[in-house]
Image: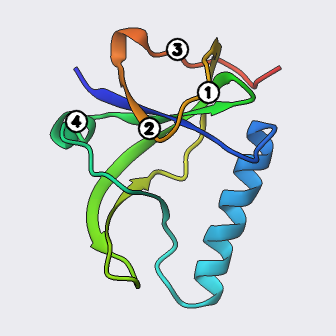
C-alpha cells in the first residue's frame, strides 16, 4: 500500500488558487525554455521514499482542511545554490480534489497512511 505525505499549503485560500499558481509556474518554465515540472522543495528527504514512490501523493492542507492531493512522481536529492542539501518532491500537475478532512497546523510534512487519507471527490469541490 502506498504511503502519502501531508503538507500545509501556506498563503493559499482555495484549491483554484493553488491550480492557478502551479499553472503559472509551468508556463514560466516553458517561456524560459526549462522543463515544465512542478516540484516542492523540502529540507529533509523522506526515509520511506520507496513507499511514497509506489503510488503516493502529497495531500495539501488548505485553510485547516485537506482539500486536494497531487501524485508524487519523483523524489530527488539536490544541493541548492548555497551548498545545502535539499529534497525535491516532483509532483504530477494533476490536482485531485478530496473530501475535506480537518487537520491542525504543523510545520514541515508528515507521513499519511493510505488508510487515514481522505477519499477523492467524484465531482468538483463545492
First reached walking from the N terminus: tag 2 or tag 4:
4
Quadrant of the image occupied by residue 76: bottom left
- The residue where tag 3 is placed is 118
Disc 3 is placed on an element classified as loop
Label 3 Cα crowd, 10 Å radius (few <14 / some 14-19 / many 20+): some
Disc 4 is placed on an element classified as loop
Residue 54 disc label = 4
In space, the residues marked 1 and 3 are separated at their CA atoms by 17 Å
First reached walking from the N terminus: tag 3 or tag 4:
4
In space, the residues marked 1 and 4 are separated at their CA atoms by 27 Å
**Circles 3 and 4: CB atoms closer than 8 Å:** no
Q: Position of residue 67 (x, y in %)?
A: 65, 26
- What residue lies at 30% left-to-right and 34% top-to-bottom? 55
Q: Is residue 38 above or below residue 4?
A: below
In space, the residues marked 3 and 4 are separated at their CA atoms by 18 Å
Q: Is residue 61 above or below residue 99?
A: below
Residue 105 disc label = 1
Nearer mark to the viewer, of 1 and 3: 1
Disc 2 is placed on an element classified as strand
- The residue where tag 2 is placed is 109
Q: Quadrant of the N terminus?
A: top left
Amino acid at each position: 500500500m502506498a504511503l502519502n505525505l501531508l503538507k500545509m499549503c501556506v498563503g493559499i485560500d482555495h484549491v483554484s488558487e493553488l491550480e492557478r499558481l502551479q499553472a503559472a509556474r509551468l508556463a514560466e518554465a516553458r517561456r524560459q525554455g526549462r522543463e515544465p515540472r512542478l516540484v516542492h522543495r523540502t529540507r529533509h528527504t523522506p526515509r520511506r521514499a520507496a513507499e511514497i514512490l509506489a503510488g503516493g501523493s502529497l495531500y495539501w492542507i488548505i485553510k485547516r482542511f485537506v482539500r486536494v492531493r497531487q501524485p508524487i512522481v519523483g523524489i530527488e536529492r539536490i544541493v541548492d545554490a548555497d551548498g545545502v542539501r535539499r529534497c525535491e518532491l516532483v509532483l504530477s500537475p494533476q490536482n485531485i480534489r478530496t473530501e475535506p478532512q480537518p487537520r491542525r497546523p504543523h510545520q514541515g510534512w508528515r507521513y499519511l497512511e493510505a488508510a487515514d487519507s481522505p477519499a477523492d471527490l467524484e465531482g468538483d469541490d463545492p
